[in-house]
Image (tube, rainbow, N blue to C red):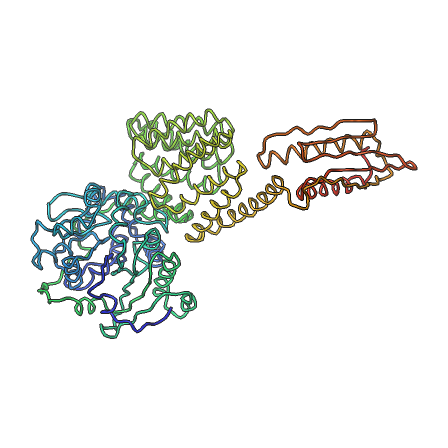
Amino acid sequence: MELTNLKITDIFNTNGKFTFLVGAGCSINSPSCLPAGYAMMEAIIDHACDKSESEGILELIKLGEVRFETLVEIFRDSLDEKLVLIDYYGICDKPNIQHFFLAEMIKKGHFVMTTNFDHLIEYALNQSGVPIEEIIPVITKEDFEVFADPYEQLNQGKKTVYKVHGSPKNIITQKDTKDSLIATIQAFGSNKEGENVFQLESFKQPLFENITKERSLAIIGYSGSDDFDIVPTLKILKQIQNVIWINYSHDIEIGKEQIFEIDDHTPQSLNNLDLNLRKVVQILFEIWQMKNADHVYLLNVNTKKMAEGLIDSKPDLSSENFSLQPKDYLNSIYPEVNDIIKYQIPYKIYIDKDMYDNALRCLKKLKQVADDTGDTMWKAIILNNTGQIFNKQRKYTDALKKFEEAKKIAVDLGGDVGLKLISSIYNNMGDVYVSKNDYPGAINLYKEAAKIHRQYGNLNGTAINLNNVGSIYRIQERFSESLKYYEEALKIADQLGNIRFKSSILNNSGLVYANQRNYSEALKRHEEALKISEQLGDKSLNLLCLHNIGTIRQSQGNYQEAIKLFNEALRIAEQIGDVKSKDIILKYIRKNSEQESVKQGMESETESYQEIRKIKDVIICHPKRWKTIYIKNYIKIFVENFFNGFRDHFNWQRIETICDELEPNLLSISSGSSYKATFQIIEKDKNKEILIEWEEHSETARVIWEGMIQEFRKRLSKPGPK
């Protein structure tokens, strides 16, 4: 990267059109004083985890191994069903200078969206003279659909704030919007690292594209290591003018700012940077590689000083700071946390990170607590969880033993609680049977689990188990049964509106149709899944769909189209750093390139082979045991297997290979119109020679016949069969 002579005023010039993407860093300065993600995570761990586990988990958080949303989701599932925790961010009503700067940007016709849960930009708008009725927070699914065109609101004089992570409340309408926040937390908590904000909430994607098109995107308030994985989201954008990452630098005031432009030489600068800045620059380099923006800049400056320097009029900030600390808030909403919860939260964190020994340690302590309190439901849950870990550790006998113990307790519990536990246990037992390749046993268990899920109305669980059954039938090549279960699961996924799961089932059923050589239906399935992957902005799913479609084109002999699809999949694999998929795809590309070359040779003759030429050769057999009948049988079987296998491999229409005996020692062999040869066996001084004459129709015919003759020579030079 190169240090430019640009100044902030050059970047944020009066003619520019900007969209600001705002992170938690903007709410840290006084008087807002809201804690950054780590401070809240530290408070949660300190309040809700046993002291024996908290130190190790905090170390994971420091290393960036535990995401904010993941921890919040675990906290919600364990203790905070209504997500009262997030209400903390709505208590603060003291916007700082950065919020007033963003409010001014909105008033000037720029766009602002934030991943923050607070309402401080809305407060800043109102306190800077914008009437309440002109402020529109966009929070819910309905909001994102109604206000998908930001220019429409701009033209109406509305001041819009887009809350892309949701918010507990719309402070303008006073409407409770916590459902939107819960959905986003769940989406992020279950997401994998490297996925974007619209992966599971596709209704936000049109807005995000509209709000950034032909504008410069300024990213402010992000450290590069916080809860928002911004890179994949930016990779899906098109037609951006510039990307400007405003990196908070405490000692750099406006006028002394440093503006670097990202270029080809950027990787050479990485080793000279500290760890945090290195991550930011790596992010920017990946964005620059996408070539979706004209320029990508890193701007080092104190963001508070920048806001003070760029704002037109100094706002009247609150003289009092927001002082409620996260630990005090947690104590007020959950003054007591029982021992079950204090070990359950660490257990879930460890399981999420595949740290099985740590997870088992927590389960052992949980069992002691359950035994002491006589809590039979928790005993069953702990046994079930232990069995899951044993399965992952390939301790199948131990796993099944734990599941049987859990099942016995669940049956005694009865009611909905018992049923839910039994369905989970059956599903987990099914996973063990799959691991042991006991497919009939797994099918029975998955069917039982699906039956119980239906009984208490868990459609999602039902669909998952039906999909599992379909997949096992596919492995067993029981295709009609497989499709039956996939179709049933697909109907439920449609009913639930779960398009991610729908795409998975479409891909699975597409594989079945491909195995049946029903390529048109297979393509239909995979292409529909591909559309969903594009709608979700899911690069990993996109890669899988392209690969599946590519393999079908390969099976159809359309190698050029297959190569094109595999190259696109390769590009995505490189983007997301999927080394394993990249290696596999490269092999497919090489294979299809070779097959396309052979196919072209088969289908078109070069000028030098316009006339059929007859080529003669001689093979001398080993003196031992080669009887004439053995030679004829060997040649017949080899040639027939070769051509039939060759055509199967290339998926050509089967052309019969004909071997005729013209005389007792003379064979005529033909396969289609391009492959003809005669083999005459001559006995000479107790040895045998084979006179071969084959027709050369093309370069490919020559290569194939020469390869076969080489194989004959290699085998016949050794003693014949006993």
Quadrant for the N terminus, please. bottom left
Vertical placement of residue 422 versus 53, above or below:
above
Residue 430 x/y as whole percent:
44, 32
Q: Is residue 106 left or right of residue 364?
A: left
Instruction: Name the side, left or right, on which 677 lies relative to 166.
Output: right
Looking at the image, how many numbered discs can be counted on the residues?
A: 0
Q: Is residue 386 visible?
A: yes
**Outermost residue toward the right in this view:** 685
Compared with residue 196, is residue 510 higher up or lower down, i.e. above or below?
A: above
Q: Quadrant of the C terminus?
A: top right
Residue 409 showing in the rendered view: no
Residue 303: percent from left, percent from top: 22, 66
Left or right position of 386 against 54? right
Q: Residue 657's x, y, as percent?
A: 68, 29
User: Of residues 525 and 198, which is closer to you in this image?
Assistant: 525
Q: Is residue 240 left or right of residue 266?
A: left
Q: Position of residue 243 (x, y in %)?
A: 30, 60
Write down the quadrant of residue 41 in the picture.
bottom left
